[in-house]
Image (cartoon, rainbow, N blue to C red):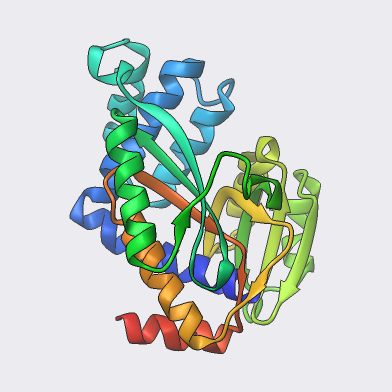
Amino acid sequence: MAGHSKWAGIKHKKAIVDARRGKLFTKLARAITVAAREGGGDPNTNASLGLAVQRAKDASMPKDNIERAIQKGVGGGADAETWEAVLYEGYGPGGVALLIEALTDNRNRTGSEVRHLLSKHGGNLGEPGSVAYLFDKKGIVVVDAARYTEDDLMPAIEAGAEDIAQDEDVFEIVTEPSDFKAVHDALEVAGVEMQSAEVRWQPKTSVPLEEDGAAKLMKLIDALEDNDDVGQVNANFDVSADVMERVAAAAG
């Protein structure tokens, strides 16, 4: 979806700025620690850890920080044991479905904060299962279609990508989560610059939004992602790239 792809690229650039402030690094380190605790400290055999490490590398997180987070997880420290992954489901402005991924040491606190943010920005929290069926978990790599052709992206197919689709000014490369790292690495070796690369809940259907609705939704997503416990917000909206650029510009 054009709007979602464009927003992914904008978020990726914004994430680099956020990382310099330290908040993103804290969230990424926490995700690495939990993944290492649950599946072991080798990113090559622990897929969840491999994905968490890749996200950290894409955000330019220092290698020492990544290694410390892994050791914290496999060391079984008391702090590592307190964190758990939680998935919240709800709706935003315009009836857009939301899957909100969080890591928390207090479900009551985080649930209350997520509920409050949704309500404040014209949304509401749903019951488990209320929107999850609208999404599939996929690896998504976004590449500038003005710089590359489909032929340039063939290494992704050879590495296991499911599909390459052009949507306005970007290519979206879709993979199974288990193939994401191999596809990412193949593109990196081929010298293809990625606007964004992540494993996320990809919507099966989309809700069209005009500029006003998109602006309200982006405010909600920004507010959620600014929460210390929220890692990623997934939404099934669709807007044009032009509208998304105007919304992003207005948001600063």
Q: Look at the image and tell me whether residue 15 can be seen.
A: no
Left or right, 245 with respect to 169, comes to left
Residue 19 on image: x %, y %: 28, 54
Name above or below for residue 188 compared with residue 178.
Answer: below
Image vertical order of residue 53 relative to residue 148, above or below? above
The foreground one among 204 and 162 is 204
Query: Residue at the spot x=77%, y=69% of the render?
Result: 150
Quadrant in which residue 56 is drawn: top left
How many marks are shown on the rendered structure? Answer: 0
Residue 195 in sight in this render: yes
| Residue at the farthest left position | 21
Is 241 situated left or right of 1 in this image?
Answer: left
Nearer-the-camera pick, 28 or 150: 28
Residue 17 horizontal/vertical position (percent): 28, 63
Q: Residue at x 66, y 40 (%)?
A: 177
Q: Quadrant of residue 12?
A: bottom left
Locate residue 45 relative to residue 78 in the image: left or right: right
| Residue 219 place in picture, x, y as percent | 36, 71
Foreground: 123 or 18? 123
Q: Position of residue 168 (x, y in %)?
A: 68, 82
Residue at the (42%, 71%) spot, across then down: 218
Q: Quadrant of the N terminus?
A: bottom right
Rendered-image quadrant of the C terminus: bottom left
Residue at 51 percent across and 65 percent down: it is 8
